[in-house]
């Protein structure tokens, strides 16, 4: 039995994208490349070996992870939440490999950050916030804005939340991952550091064996969606801060990068505006559907005749149908009042000049509407 959780030995030994399991959970918790060796007092101990680490990382090399349906739902919720809070989004794709979480504990020596429910690589909102803040601190004349947008630094006694909310950055679709390697050329030098006990530290030398250490990365060309929103949507200053942050975020991810090994070119992103337009259109469709769901039968009937988007078409329906229905004394007074209210709003939105200064043709219609409304 391998040294895994209870029933962990029943976990899949090989990665299978069609199995539908959480890849992050599998990769982090069910490592199965252990071997046994004789330990102290002739006991048997579980141990790791470099070959097993490579085999584990290679299980995911070149594969795609994540469930497209679950990802689409999660990203849509995040986009709609950001837009509904007067925020905005950016779609950014990895220019080259991207990795975060190397410092996390893992049997292969280098960890990886997985989104717990979705089982895909992601950037926590706190990380996105830290990257953008680090970038703004290299700019001039933004000290006051940094404090307001990101909050005070360190253990400041002045407690306050920043004016901008940073959401987790999620992949918009399944993510391709790739194996990579860090090669330690001076392993004895790093392991035998001077501990102050008089032991001489092993100097770095060319005759040491290079030791390749595998780790997992996100492949180039993978698109992530970044979202922000003002903490107080009703405050103009917070909304303006969001606009500034969008520019800073794009610059930070393009020039500085996110995650680990940015000095070596990892973690750089570039914008994908076409995807942003697609999400904006989807949000507008969502709003239209939501508004229609709140409409009564009269407004829905008017919408069918062009009330919101086809003024010329609706003008004809207004003349031939709605004015007559509004003036029908046999009709329900509440319906007549509703029709008059909607027609008045339509005139003021689509024909304001006719509403305020009606010509000879429109005067009877305008007067009838105002009469029903008691104006």
Image: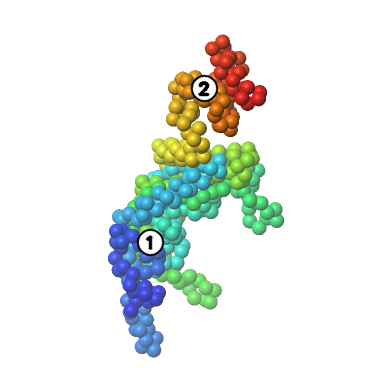
Q: Residue furthest top?
A: 360
> In the rendered view of the protein, which quadrant contains the N terminus?
bottom left
Element class at badge 2: helix
Q: Position of residue 135 (x, y in %)?
A: 54, 46
Q: Nearer the viewer, residue 165 or 347?
A: 347
State how the image is colored: rainbow
Q: Residue at x 51, y 36 (%)?
A: 296
Label 2 sits on residue: 324
Which of label 2 and label 1 is nearer to you? 2
Q: Nearer the viewer, residue 136 or 189?
A: 136
Check if mark 2's residue and mark 1's residue have beta carbons within 8 Å: no
> In the rendered view of the protein, which quadrant contains the C terminus?
top right
Q: Position of residue 75 (x, y in %)?
A: 44, 48
Q: Is residue 210 visible?
A: no
Q: Position of residue 258 (x, y in %)?
A: 47, 50
Label 1 sits on residue: 22
Q: Residue at x 52, y 40 (%)?
A: 294
Q: Residue at x 48, y 73 (%)?
A: 200
Q: Is residue 201 above or below residue 162?
A: below
Q: Position of residue 320 (x, y in %)?
A: 47, 20
């Amino acid at each position: 039995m391998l040294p895994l959780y209870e029933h962990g030995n029943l976990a899949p030994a090989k990665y299978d994208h069609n199995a539908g399991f959480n890849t992050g959970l599998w990769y982090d918790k069910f490592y199965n490349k252990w071997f046994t060796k004789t330990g102290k007092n002739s006991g048997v101990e579980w141990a790791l070996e470099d070959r097993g680490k490579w085999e584990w990382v290679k299980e995911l090399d070149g594969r795609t992870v994540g469930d497209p349906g679950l990802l689409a739902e999660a990203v849509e919720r995040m986009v709609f939440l950001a837009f509904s809070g007067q925020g905005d989004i950016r779609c950014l794709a990895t220019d080259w490999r991207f990795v975060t979480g190397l410092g996390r504990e893992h049997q292969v020596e280098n960890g990886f950050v997985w989104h717990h429910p979705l089982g895909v690589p992601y950037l926590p909102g706190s990380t996105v916030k830290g990257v953008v803040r680090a970038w703004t601190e290299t700019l001039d004349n933004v000290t006051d804005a940094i404090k307001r947008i990101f909050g005070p630094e360190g253990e400041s006694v002045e407690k306050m939340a920043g004016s901008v909310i940073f959401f987790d950055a999620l992949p918009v679709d399944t993510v391709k991952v790739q194996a990579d390697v860090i090669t330690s050329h001076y392993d004895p030098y790093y392991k035998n550091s001077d501990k102050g006990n008089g032991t001489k530290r092993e100097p770095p030398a060319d005759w040491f064996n290079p030791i390749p250490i595998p780790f997992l990365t996100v492949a180039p060309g993978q698109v992530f969606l970044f979202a922000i929103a003002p903490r107080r949507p009703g405050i103009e200053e917070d909304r303006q801060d969001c606009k500034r942050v969008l520019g800073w975020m794009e610059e930070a991810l393009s020039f500085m990068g996110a995650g680990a090994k940015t000095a070596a070119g990892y973690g750089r992103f570039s914008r994908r505006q076409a995807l942003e337009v697609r999400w904006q259109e989807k949000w507008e469709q969502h709003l239209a559907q939501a508004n229609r769901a709140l409409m009564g039968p009269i407004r829905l009937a008017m919408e069918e005749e062009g009330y919101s988007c086809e003024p010329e078409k609706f003008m004809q329906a207004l003349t031939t149908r709605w004015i007559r229905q509004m003036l029908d004394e046999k009709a329900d007074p509440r319906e007549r009042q509703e029709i008059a209210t909607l027609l008045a709003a339509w005139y003021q939105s689509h024909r304001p000049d006719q509403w305020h200064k009606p010509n000879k043709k429109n005067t009877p219609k305008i007067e009838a509407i105002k009469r029903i409304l008691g104006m």
